Image (spheres, grey):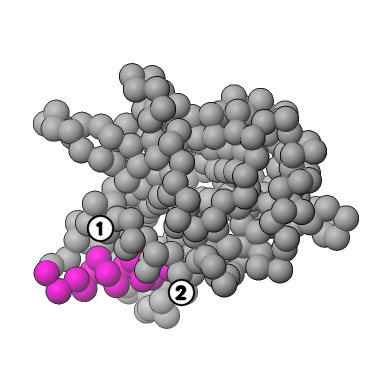
């Protein structure tokens, strides 16, 4: 599997990055046995549609997944709709859009579209829940309860290892969440953990919304994750401060991601 950071700015787009959006890819075979690359997005916040075009032809996108439907994680779904529906060379095929809430209603809200708009032929909306799972090509995708003010999930993906051909690798993405037992279970023994860390230790005391660097490190430690990536830092946060807090709570490798980073899993 290969992870590309399309956008990683927390709560809004930032000076150097779009808001949250990630591209996960893996090589596999289609139904006829022909080799191909499978691609899916995880979250799709403001600015990610334009940045995705740097890395992928939307015609090659197989599915879209959402950890939750706050605007900073889903607003560019409207841009994806316009691109796929009105491409001058012809409408692109329908793709599945997986979310833990009613993404049809949310897309109408974002686009200002009437109730009769169903996006039929462009999106097939699939509501997911903790404990459910789906298969997309070589990806096995599982969903775990997150601790956030709206319906939200953490996402765990098992797929072919890029680093060790012939073996499976595991990747986990927290979405937006505070530290909780279900997120620990989601991240159990993963090769790569992508954790939000929007709050700063000693400054942001409200609970039940976001991780701090310390809590992201504790999550990685409790879950025995092998490597930790930090994301969803707001533009006003100091990445080095958040990273140091995570490193104090986790003995493994820690890195704050940047837009355009790629990781082999």
Q: Where residue 16 sits: x, y (%)? A: 54, 68
- Residue at (50, 66) in percent of width and height: 18
Corner quadrant of residue 218: top right
Q: Which mark is residue 57?
A: 1
Q: Nearer the viewer, mark 1 or mark 2?
A: 1
Question: Is 97 included in the stretch rendered in magenta?
Answer: no
Numbered disc 2: secondary structure: helix
Residue 232 place in picture, x, y as percent: 61, 57
In the image, 225: left or right of 18? right
Q: Residue at x 42, y 80 (%)?
A: 112
Residue occupying image coordinates x 76% and y 54%: 241
Q: Is residue 225 above or below residue 248?
A: above
Mark 1 neighbour class, 10 Å CA radius: few under 14, some 14 to 19, many 20 or more = few
- Horizontal and vertical percent for residue 154? 57, 43
Please indicate whether residue 83 sits to the left or right of residue 148 in the image.
left
Q: Evaluate whether residue 154 shows in this view.
A: no
Q: Nearer the viewer, residue 152 or 199?
A: 199
Q: Which residues are magenta?
A: 76-89
Say the numbered circle drawn on residue 247.
none
Disc 1, SS: loop
Q: For the stretch drawn in magenta, what is the main secondary structure?
A: helix
Q: Is residue 238 at all visible to an observer of this figure? A: yes
The answer to whether residue 176 is above or below residue 118 is: above
Asked if 221 appears above or below 38 in the picture, the reply is: above
**Residue 51: % across, % down:** 39, 64
Is 71 or 20 nearer to us in this picture?
A: 20
Residue farthest along the front direction in this orientation: 240
| Location of mark 2 (residue) | 110
Callout 2: few (<14), some (14-19), or many (20+) C-alpha neighbours within 10 Å?
Answer: some
Tell me the quarter of the image containing the C terminus.
Answer: top left
């Amino acid at each position: 599997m290969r992870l590309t950071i399309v956008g990683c700015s927390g709560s809004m787009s930032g000076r150097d990055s779009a808001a949250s959006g990630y591209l996960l890819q893996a090589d596999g075979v289609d139904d006829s046995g022909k080799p191909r690359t499978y691609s899916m997005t995880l979250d799709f916040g403001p600015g990610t549609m334009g940045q995705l075009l740097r890395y992928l032809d939307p015609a090659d996108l197989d599915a879209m997944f959402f950890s939750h439907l706050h605007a900073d994680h889903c607003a560019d779904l409207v841009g994806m709709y316009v691109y796929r529906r009105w491409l001058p060379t012809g409408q692109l095929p329908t793709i599945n859009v997986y979310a833990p809430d009613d993404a049809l209603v949310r897309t109408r809200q974002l686009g200002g579209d009437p109730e009769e708009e169903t996006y039929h032929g462009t999106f097939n909306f699939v509501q997911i829940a903790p404990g459910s799972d789906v298969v997309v090509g070589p990806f096995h995708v599982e969903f775990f309860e997150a601790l956030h003010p709206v319906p939200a999930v953490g996402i765990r993906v098992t797929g072919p290892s890029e680093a060790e051909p012939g073996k499976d690798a595991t990747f986990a993405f927290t979405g937006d969440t505070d530290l909780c037992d279900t997120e620990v279970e989601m991240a159990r023994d993963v090769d790569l953990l992508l954790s939000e860390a929007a709050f700063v230790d000693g400054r942001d005391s409200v609970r039940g919304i976001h991780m701090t660097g310390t809590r992201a490190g504790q999550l990685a430690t409790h879950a025995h994750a092998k490597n930790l990536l930090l994301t969803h830092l707001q533009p006003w946060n100091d990445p080095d401060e958040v990273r140091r807090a995570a490193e104090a709570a986790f003995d493994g490798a820690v890195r704050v991601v940047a837009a355009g980073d790629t990781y082999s899993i």
